[in-house]
Amino acid sequence: MALLGQFPALAGVDLEIGPREVVLLQGPNGAGKSSLLRLCAGLLRPESGDATILGIDLAVNRAAVRRSVGLLGHDTALYDDLSVIENLRFWAEVSRVDPNAVLPALARLGVQSRLNDVAVRHLSAGQRRRVALAAVVVRRPQLWLLDEPHAGLDQAGRDLIDQLIRDAAKAGATVILASHELDRTVDLATRHLTVAGGTITRDVVVGAGGSDVA
Amino acid sequence: MWSSEPEVAMWRDARLVALKDLQIEWRSRTTFSQVVPFAGLVLVLFGFALDANRPVLERATSGLFWVTVLFVSNLAVQRSTSIETTDGARRALLLAGIEPASVYVGKAVAVAVQLLLVEMLLVGGVIVLYGAEIQDWPLLIATCVVATAGIAGAGTLLGALVAGVRARETVLPVLLLPVLAPVLIGATRAFDDALGSVAVDGWAWLGLLAGFGAINVVLGALAYGVLLEET
């Protein structure tokens, strides 16, 4: 169980996810999807039960878990008054990853090079989202945690995200994404989890049939 | 490429955070366009209020200087806190795996640098507006540095404490100003000596200020991680 404030955000989640899996979390607002992502990122502490992320016990070493994941939430964690490059170089340096990976990551996300020196405050919502995703790419995480990754993006941006997710899984990473855009993400995912009331009610492995958990 | 020594890594991260905050301030010009005019205005208004009684103004110069600095420190800490809370950067700092003590030291240093710049201008202000004469420059400079370290240390910690509070703009000064009362008292006495306006041992007061600053900084470095996690 994990608490959000004083309220149980997750209760009775029993889940094992392997490498190369692309897991889609679906469910209504407030079901616990974002809380599950935050728990996997080491940002929420399990109040009871066990949680092992990438082989690391969450109760023992949350810092190690955090360093190994890439989380894209609703916020972009970008500083408005710094340029795109300055933002990404800062996050690369404090995350102990190679700052030289910044430019290729921005190119991969389709961020035009003319925007590199532009202050983030001047970017559109979609451009900000791409830059935030580039920050995740720079970290080369073993576990990708994406909360509504397609939100605010145009068609080309959405296609890029899909390709990014496929490539990450192909390279051996695990991807967990929460999304309401089922028409797009259902085909992308190799496994569908339905979350409701802070627990997983349905677990379907694509091609292997589904099972009601609760 | 990066040092594996935890101490070296901590100072390196603190430097990165401090440079980032100062870079943001330089770009946004908040200190120069808002904080400095505010500080100047407070100094001028104090002057208006007490100018009719010049001896009182001269005796009160040190206190007015440090009250102005406390008002400015509230603005600087508000700004420093909002940099991390506006778009979820606090969470990203946790995910980066950076030591909370590094974040604390970096942010406190950035606040201190801004306050020292404002204090330099305010010293010029009290010389020009209040006719203050500096008798002991080393004591004055040492007081500014030591008091500012204490203010920045306590302010950064309290800024993190109220970061998750909806009305943090009003809660912060209510917490910060009482906590900084010892700085106000110590720095005012030390300044009195530096200005030659009151016969006190300014260096002894400076020692007290240093003790207060050290407690604040150590407490902040230890507690900041908990606040970063919980707020």
Image (cartoon, rainbow, N blue to C red):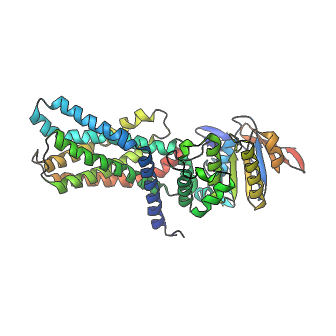
Q: Is residue A8 found left or right of B169 in the rendered image?
A: right
Residue drawn at 11 percent across, 48 percent down: B196
Total marks in image: 0
Residue B78, given in percent of the width and then of the height, sits at 41, 40
Q: From the image, which quarter does the N terminus of chain B lie in?
A: bottom right
Of residue A45 and residue B142, the one placed in the foreground of this image is B142
Q: Position of residue B85 (x, y in %)?
A: 51, 42
Q: Is residue B53 above or below residue A115?
A: above
Q: Is residue A68 visible?
A: no
Q: Residue at x 61, y 53 (%)?
A: A113
Quadrant hosting residue A183: top right
| Residue at the image position 42 percent from the left and 42 percent from the top | B79
**Front residue of this view, candidates B212 and B10:** B10
For residue A164, say whether it is visible.
Answer: yes
Q: Nearer the viewer, residue A35 or A179?
A: A179
From the viewer's perspective, tell me whether residue B163 is left or right of residue A159. Answer: left
Q: Is residue B220 left or right of residue A153?
A: left
